[in-house]
Amino acid sequence: MNINERLRDALGEYRDQARVSPDLFDRIEARTQRPVLLRRPAVSFRTLVPAAAALLVIVTIAVTLVIRTGGPDEAQVSSGAAGGCAGNLYAINDGTVSRIDAATGAVSAPISVDTDPGTSPQAVAIAPDGKHAYVTSILRSATDLEGNVGDGTVSVIATATGKVSAPIPVGKEPGTVAIAPDGKHAYVNNVGDGTVSVITTATGKVSAPIPVGKEPGTVAIAPDGKHAYVTSLDGTSGEGTVSAITTATGKVSARIPVADAPGAVVITPDGKHAYVSSAPRAVGPNIPTAGTVSVITTATGKVSARIPVGKGPGDVAITPDGELAYVTTFDGTSGEGAVSVITTATGKVSPLKAVGKHLGGVVITPDGEHAYVASGDYGVGDAEATVSVITTATGEVSAPITVGSVFAPVAVRGGSVLISPDSEHAYLISFDILFDDSGPVGPVATVLVIDTASSAVSARIPLGRTGDFAPVPLAICPARSAPRRP
């Protein structure tokens, strides 16, 4: 059966499931464009029209069967296990991990990281030498009736073979994993029990948990590997701290008070300072007030400056030369997002004009020439997701790169961006959320590839159904490898 026959059969099946008339379905099919990007619905699921369901189903099936059309360069889903790293991508998707060949766009067969069906992968990180991928997971089947999450694990994937080690037990509700620059240790923040687990990568052994405070968030490791910095938040008072862990001893050497609700922590390339964003929420959980960035002098473990940067600061990224820090901000009332730029030598802030709504992360290219920011609109109808590019030398903001448009009355939101080691491509995850007249029937994740030279989307690589509406973690291998240009 050729691909057109498979597509017609699949469309017929989904036409029946969508419960719309054949005539209406045919009219929608004729108007089908590219997939829409969705992260969070702006209206009640049950109020979405069946036409939106049919349109999104058609688009998703089409791009799943044909990743890129037009000849021998089509990206195909491979049936073998994951191969070597070489600049490839690893994405968590619906309880498994997929390897994406950055040179061809081919997606590996799903890699299961645990035999327990209740395991839910959370985050993925690649070792500096590219030989292993580390995946944190939560055992969802251990969640009790009160919502307390069970213990977590870390699985290690050999990137050359795709083989997975036996899961390594860590603390409750592990979040992200950060790997030391020398690759000898991996640090896992356990949100559920306020600790950090340290894994010796050569043996897979775990040290005794290190208490760091409630709800530990981001972990950042100094360039020399001597200290790890972990944000924590008291869920009751909102008071924030940063715990400095001396990696040689596994002990907390300092607990550094910062402003309420700390978010990201980033270390400067010279290791002399840590920048911590804080976004207090005085009105409600979704209405950030004016926030700050705390600057910690790592030699003393003291906050040397608190820099006002606007409402709702979120992500922080520092240029490779350490001269500029970029901070995303968010106005919870208007939904407008912007990026503030801090000159690290003086602490002076140069706010940029708005770069979109509901900003995701900000990332600097390895060559330091550009900053990429993803954004999306929660509106309906003509809402769209975009990526803005900032030229670091001038502060100029490019015309937004449209990475998805909405035909049906549904919502869209941007996400974080990854940059290839050679700065030639940018990657981000989007959602195509499918609906029928009873509500959502499942989101589908897509990897978008942006050619940085032309500022155009060069490929859309479907990953398939996701387990829920949460962001899909994505990691890139450190070695150089560029996708084939279409």
Image (tube, rainbow, N blue to C red):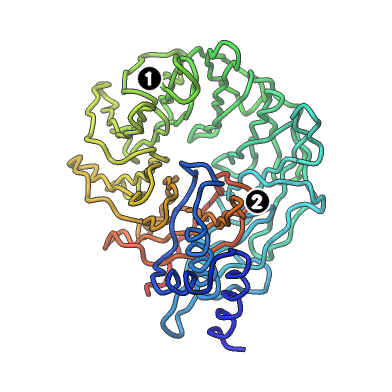
Q: Position of residue 8 (x, y in %)?
A: 56, 80
Query: At numbered mark 1, what does the secondary structure look like: helix, strand or loop?
Result: strand
- Disc 1: CA contacts within 10 A as few (<14), some (14-19) or many (>=20): many
Q: Nearer the viewer, residue 236 or 131?
A: 236
Query: At numbered mark 2, what does the secondary structure look like: helix, strand or loop?
Result: loop
* In the depicted structure, whether residue 357 falls above or below residue 423: above
Q: Position of residue 215 (x, y in %)?
A: 62, 24
Side of 378 relative to 143 (left or right): left
First in residue order: circle 2 vs circle 1: 1
Circles 2 and 1: CB atoms closer than 8 Å: no
* In the depicted structure, whether residue 349 falls above or below residue 201: above
- Tell me the number on the disc at residue 291: 1
Q: Quadrant of residue 470?
A: top right
Please name the residue that numbered disc 2 is placed on: 467
Side of 428 relative to 186 (left or right): left
Who's the residue at 54% across and 34% down the image? 225
The Cα atoms of the two marked residues, 2 and 1, are separated by 33 Å
Amino acid type of the residue tagged 2 in the rendering: Gly
- Disc 2: CA contacts within 10 A as few (<14), some (14-19) or many (>=20): some
Who's the residue at 40% across and 32% down the image? 268
